[in-house]
């Protein structure tokens, strides 16, 4: 099949890219509701729940670690071609997951699947940015970002429905025809490689190893609660690999990470903003259902519906942000989104035990819209700050910044939350029966104990939201530095 030379229809480009982002993002969260069925089928006891969590963690790590090198490969060999290669890897991985005879096989297959899936979002963003005119670039990036957010949001519901109808393995078998459709559609897109410079595979491996070590380190809450040998060793290894990467990049003739990228205040500011947004987002996403299911006394389905109010607003906000960028500019839209997010989080932090409508929905939707609004402007400014032949690597780094922010935020939240709850409950005594005490008096003390325990839990969750709001406000600083700058004419020059 021969690729056309003419620029394809913009609708086709966006349709292919958005569908790819949706399908691969689904697999980030699709197994959440399927884990009980997976454990039963693969005969994993409940006492090994920590091992099962790696079914999710393995995909997130592979998704993050593979992005930078695959993004750079796409810059060199052409976005459609590398996108197709990534789809092949994703399809092979998803088939291996569906065939899993045991948990270890499944975890390894999820890594393979994630390596392919992780390439689709940054390459798709670079593809959309390159084929769209400047005035429509913000909308295109907003649509791609919104599709990825929608995939993550719909994953648990989609997975639960398939498990009920056909079993958990069909979650992955259904990925194959979807990937095949995308693979064939990409033949209609022109492939424009730039092979004047070799790919820095050494830099790619060093970066992947550094990201993996740092991600594993910060994903362990014990890193933040005191000395723990393993996470400290992983953190040290990650920092050592990062130093080695920096030394290699300074000497490489064709570095994986263009030097001008880190000299660009605009690009660095965009990534810093994205990292802080990731921290705030994961805090909100974890705390909303947790608070509903514990101190609020709601069932898990109700907690999921509460979270859906926020996450459903994120794709809508991403599209609105994309439309607004061309009219209002990058910084005003970014600052508006951050302000809405901070206000929404602060409102949620004031919730009483008996929070009711319409305040519940209004506060969560406001927060979700704010998170969505910042997607397109951050990506637009980051990609506008780099040369056209570096968009794949740049888009990958922006996505990695967000994933690292989410990993760091979740680990820090878990560690700080346990310690803070112990502080809040330090003065409470378990109401054990006292000699000669009447049943009514014992019941009164028990009710008072439960009341104070619930109050401590509510205070803890309220403080989580306040921390998320403070992180969002801190993102104003790098967001203000996202001024429009001169784009480098070339990301790389052939070595002499």
Image (cartoon, rainbow, N blue to C red):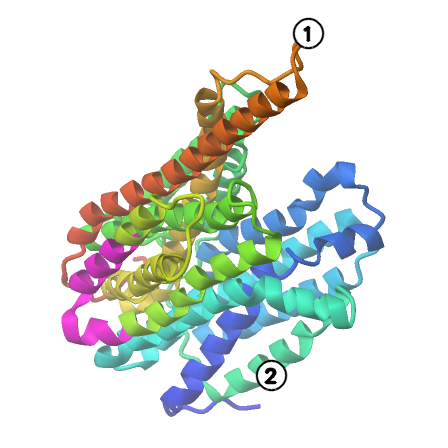
The residue where tag 2 is placed is: 181
The answer to whether 461 is drawn above or below residue 38 in the figure is above
Which residue does the image show at 33% across and 44% down from the upper left? 350
Secondary structure beneath label 2: helix
Extent of the magenta region: 322-341
Nearer to us of marks 1 and 2 is: 1
Q: Where is residue 48 shown, x and y percent of the image?
A: 75, 38
Which residue does the image show at 15% across and 71% down from the upper left? 328
**Gap between marks 1 and 2 measured at Cα:** 74 Å
Disc 1 + disc 2, Cβ < 8 Å: no
Depth check: 106 or 385 in front? Answer: 106
Sort mark 1 into few (<14), some (14-19) or many (20+) by Cα contacts within 10 Å.
few
Residue furthest out toward the top: 435
Q: Where is residue 161 shown, x and y percent of the image?
A: 68, 69
The label number, if any, that marks residue 176 in the structure image: none
Which of the 4 image quadrants contains residue 34? bottom right
Residue 319 located left or right of residue 410: left
The residue where tag 1 is placed is: 435
Residue 450 located left or right of residue 200: right
Q: Main secondary structure of the magenta part?
A: helix
Question: Quadrant of the image for the C terminus?
Answer: bottom left
Residue 335 magenta-highlighted: yes
Which of the 4 image quadrants contains residue 166? bottom right
Residue 199 magenta-highlighted: no
The answer to whether 340 is drawn above or below residue 434 in the figure is below
Residue 455 located left or right of residue 262: right
Q: Where is residue 487 shown, x and y percent of the image?
A: 19, 64
Sort mark 2 into few (<14), some (14-19) or many (20+) by Cα contacts within 10 Å.
few
Depth check: 482 or 303 in front? Answer: 303
Which residue does the image show at 23% across and 54% down from the upper left? 339
Which residue does the image show at 55% across and 42% down from the upper left? 294
Q: Where is residue 463 shown, x and y percent of the image?
A: 37, 36
């Amino acid at each position: 099949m021969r690729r056309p030379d003419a620029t394809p229809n913009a609708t086709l480009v966006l349709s292919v890219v958005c569908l790819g982002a949706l399908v691969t993002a689904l697999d980030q969260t699709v197994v959440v509701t399927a884990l009980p069925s997976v454990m039963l089928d693969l005969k994993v006891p409940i006492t090994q729940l920590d091992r099962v969590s790696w079914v999710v963690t393995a995909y997130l790590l592979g998704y993050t670690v593979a992005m930078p090198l695959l993004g750079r490969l796409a810059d060199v060999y052409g976005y459609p071609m590398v996108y197709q290669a990534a789809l092949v890897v994703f399809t092979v991985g998803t088939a291996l997951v569906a065939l899993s005879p045991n948990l270890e096989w499944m975890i390894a297959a999820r890594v393979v699947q994630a390596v392919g899936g992780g390439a689709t979002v940054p390459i798709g963003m670079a593809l959309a940015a390159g084929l769209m005119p400047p005035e429509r670039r913000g909308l295109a990036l907003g649509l791609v970002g919104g599709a990825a957010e929608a995939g993550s949001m719909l994953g648990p519901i989609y997975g639960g429905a398939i498990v009920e109808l056909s079993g958990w393995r069909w979650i992955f078998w259904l990925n194959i025809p979807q990937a095949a459709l995308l693979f064939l559609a990409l033949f209609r897109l022109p492939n424009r490689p730039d092979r004047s410079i070799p790919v820095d595979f050494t830099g790619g491996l060093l970066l992947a190893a550094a990201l993996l070590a740092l991600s594993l380190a910060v994903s362990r809450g014990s890193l933040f609660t005191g000395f723990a040998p393993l996470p400290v060793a992983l953190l040290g290894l990650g920092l050592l690999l990062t130093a080695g990467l920096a030394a290699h990049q300074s000497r490489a003739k064709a570095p994986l990470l263009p030097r001008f990228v880190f000299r660009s205040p605009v690009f660095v500011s965009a990534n810093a903003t994205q990292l802080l947004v990731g921290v705030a987002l994961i805090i909100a996403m974890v705390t909303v259902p947790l608070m509903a299911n514990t101190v609020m006394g709601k069932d898990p389905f109700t907690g999921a519906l509460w979270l859906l109010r926020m996450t459903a607003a994120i794709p809508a906000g991403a599209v609105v942000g994309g439309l607004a960028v061309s009219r209002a500019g990058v910084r005003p839209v970014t600052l508006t989104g951050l302000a809405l997010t901070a206000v929404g989080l602060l409102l949620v932090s004031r919730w009483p035990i008996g929070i009711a409508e319409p305040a519940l929905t209004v506060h969560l939707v406001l927060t979700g819209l704010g998170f969505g609004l910042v997607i397109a402007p951050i990506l637009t400014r980051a990609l506008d700050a780099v040369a056209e032949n570096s968009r794949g690597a740049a888009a990958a780094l922006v996505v990695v910044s967000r994933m690292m922010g989410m990993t760091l935020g979740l680990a820090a939240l878990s560690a700080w939350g346990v310690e803070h709850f112990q502080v809040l409950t330090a003065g409470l005594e378990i109401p054990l029966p006292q000699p000669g005490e009447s049943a009514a008096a014992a019941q009164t003390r028990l009710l008072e104990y439960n009341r104070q325990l619930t109050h401590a839990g509510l205070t803890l969750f309220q403080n989580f939201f306040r921390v998320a709001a403070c992180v969002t406000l801190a993102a104003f600083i790098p967001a203000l530095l996202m001024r429009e700058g001169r784009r480098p004419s070339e990301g790389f020059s052939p070595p002499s």
